[in-house]
Image: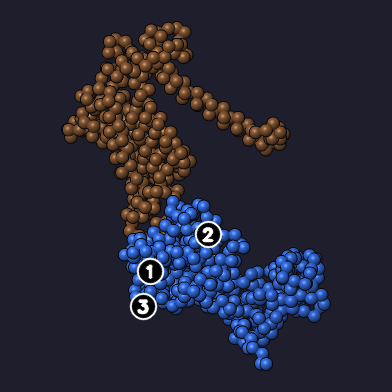
Amino acid sequence: MSVATRIRDVVSGDSDVRTVTRVGTIGALTVATILVAIPLYWMVATSLKTSVQIGVFPPYLVPPTPTIDPYVDALQTGPWAQWFLNTVVISGGSTLFVLALATPAAYVLGRREFPARKPIYVLFIGILMIPAQILLIPMYTLFSRLGLINTRLGLIVAYSAFFLGFVVFLLHSFFTNLPDNVEDAARIGGVPEWRTFLRVILPMAKPGIATAAIFVFVFTWNEFLFALTFLQTQDLYTISVGLQQFQGLRGTVVYNQLFAMSTLATLPLMIAFALFSEQFIKGMAGLNFK
Amino acid sequence: MKLEIENLRKEFGDLVAVDDVSMTIEDGEFVTFVGPSGCGKTTTLRCVAGLETPTSGALRIGGEDMTYASPEERGTAFVFQDYALYPHMTARKNMSFALESTSMDSEEISQRVEETAEMLGIREHLDQTPGELSGGQQQRVALGRSIVRDPKIFLLDEPLSNLDAKLRVQMRAELQQLHREIESTTIYVTHDQEEAMTMSDRIAILNDGSLQQIAPPEVAYSQPANEFVAGFIGSPSMNFVECTVADGSVTTGAFSVDAPGGAETATTLGIRPENLSLGHGTDGHVDAEVAVFEQVGSFNIVYLEIDGLNEEVVAQVSGEQQFDPGDRVSVTVDTDRMHLFADDGETLHNPPVFTKQPAAAE
């Protein structure tokens, strides 16, 4: 913005308000960015320090002699490749499973008339209000009877159950905002219903589905409590459970190795977000909770 | 294909959207449903298309009972008000999508799409998505999507209401041209009575879910079946003045004119704005003061306060006649063009329909 326009904006009362709003918005976003960026930076910075440099006070803001030794050492501490794979399978599986169930459900609840439509939707919303911690013990008991404890499938089922309500809620609002009549237009043309759903509705709902997918994937990627409780064999651990061993294994926390593995664990998410950020933003903008 | 609607009724819960509507639409006819918002015209159309199931009544297409048939069995095409195009597909794909679910081979599909696009003048836009097209082009794609299916009956639900005024007039002419080429039975829904008057073979006027009149435009205009039709068709609207009929004359609060026969129980006199003429003398039926003068151009509109009348009366005068608010004028009623209505709104007297003048003999 040139100085001239800025002055003009300030002089005219109307844009004055807009300038204040703009400054406020930019300020708030800057604070939010700093709050998110500092821990991330500290994690990466610490992962490049030697164990001696970590203990120094005042701490080094920038590692004085960056080293990748913590990464090399940390990778020796366990079957990290296996844990990484487990996490991919469990997160990916949960995401696919939830979407496969929630997308048709949200579509029908959002765009079709049938008896008890509202109560059923409220039931899905109700799932959102149950804290996960309350379900931990009952689910453990139930799953152990079903032989699902200490399996990847068990964790996928558990995660899917949690996210079903949330994803139905999210996609429901997305489906209700799609233009009216597109199904009718296809129906009059004699297009089978399943084809209309796959070829017309799903492509239109892509931003919403991408948003839901990212939410589920990120949360299940980071999830700790259920993974720790349900997975008992070391071979089945996810990364978040694996990271725990740096803590208290020898009485102290090995921070540089912990942060090295944390950095590696965060990387795929950052890459995924960068790839889908446009869809994600479109999805968030398209949401209209009513 | 001939369409018969018999005692059609559609309820949504307590609301009666369509109430006992019956009509027969002949093969190749262009019929317009017109009426105010919520009059049931779109619901009737959706019942014909099979998008709504009638509560009672029957529908026959080409003599075959289709009351409960699925939309695709009926062979109708529907153009929606908001077009309902598939936003992620190109215009070409929008038009071919439904055909791809049929047994038609892909070569014929693409040939049909090309031909239709040619006819509608959108050939160069076939590979664009709806978002890249203007409103008029989207409208044409929506029409094209219907035409490629070669439907027995075209159903158009306010297809022009999202276009700007100029484009609307242009598309109106194009639609008529298209109807002449395709010759398929067409039902056109609109709330714009000008569209109804200009486009149709017959217009069906609906109000509160029931059919008021179905007639050719000139008949609906000159011989409305009741007060509602009289007031709805024509712009500016017909003037209605309270009256009594006795001893061969119609008497209002301000003036008396000779009464036609058979209208003794009339309580309302209807007179169209163009059937009032204004002069500066005192030789008219009644004197009035100009309240508002609206300059239109080819004609002008004058709002009058007639001495002794509570109702405001509107007159339409030729473009050269100019007035100012406050002017005193003398009003003459064209007594050949009066309408008389009974207390329940039914018509008791109508003027004759205007007919084509016979060509002058050379």
Mark toward the viewer: 1 or 3: 1
Mark 3 to mark 2 CA distance (whole Å): 36 Å
The residue lying at 59 percent from left, 59 percent from top is: B164
Q: Residue at x 70, y 68 (%)?
A: B312
Name the kind of residue labelled 3 in the image: Gly
Is the C-beta separation of discs 1 and 3 under 8 Å?
no
Checking the image for residue B63, the label placed there is 3
| Coordinates of residue B309 in the picture (x, y in percent) | 71, 71
Q: CA distance from mark 1 to mark 2?
A: 25 Å
Residue at 69% in and 79% down: B251
Provide the residue designation for mark 2: B137
**Residue B101, above or below B74:** above
The colour applied to the residues of chain A in this rendering is brown
Q: Residue at x 43, y 53 (%)?
A: B89
Q: Colour of chain B?
A: blue
Q: Chain of mark 3?
A: B
**Residue B188, position in %: x, y?**
50, 69
